[in-house]
Image (cartoon, rainbow, N blue to C red):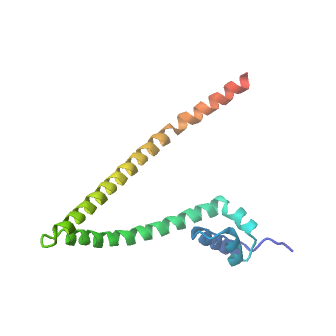
Amino acid sequence: MSTTPHPKKAQVLDDLIAVCVSHGLTDEVTGEIVGTSSRTVRRRRNEPAIAEKVAELVSQRVAAVELELSDLGSSAVRVFQEAMDPDNEMGHRLAGANSTMRHLNAARSTADLELRVEELEAVLKRAEPALARLAELEQAMGQDR
């Protein structure tokens, strides 16, 4: 009798492990939920298919949070606008303007940084074949010595 789980059961266990890990649960807690040891969870979550599933689930959760924050962003802008209403005291208007400028600068800096990182990633991607060839040549030279 084989101790290997049925393929469908194994897939369900792998999916459960991916969900638990993507929510930040420890291997021990995940093992308790799934009904296996923490060692098995650790081994399984490091397998490429499960690691990819975890990354996908985390990405989906991040996208959902970003959407919620985007919705809140519109409300925040209205609060800044209300704070700077000409009928408000000058102190409130200045505080609103100061906060608006601080957040605008932070958003611009973040956008600029993201663009620069994307550009660097593109350069590295284009350089991958040359770097791989260089590593091959270095290895070949090392073997010739």
Relative horizontal placement of residue 138, taking residue 55 as reference (left or right): right
Q: Residue at x 31, y 53 (%)?
A: 108
Residue 27, position as x, y percentages in the image: 68, 68
Q: Residue at x 24, y 68 (%)?
A: 80
Q: Quadrant of the C terminus?
A: top right
Q: Residue furthest left?
A: 87
Residue 68 vs 45, above or below: the answer is below
Residue 13 vs 142, above or below: the answer is below
Residue 10 vs 99, above or below: the answer is below
- Number of dots carrying numbers: 0
Residue 95, position as x, y percentages in the image: 24, 64
Residue 64, position as x, y percentages in the image: 44, 71
Q: Nearer the viewer, residue 68 or 16?
A: 68
Relative horizontal placement of residue 93, taking residue 60 as reference (left or right): left
Residue 29 vs 117, above or below: the answer is below
Q: Quadrant of residue 136?
A: top right
Q: Residue at x 59, y 61 (%)?
A: 52
Q: Residue at x 18, y 68 (%)?
A: 84
Q: Nearer the viewer, residue 126 or 55?
A: 55
Residue 126, position as x, y percentages in the image: 47, 39
Relative horizontal placement of residue 113, taking residue 54 as reference (left or right): left
Q: Quadrant of the N terminus?
A: bottom right
Q: Residue furthest right?
A: 1
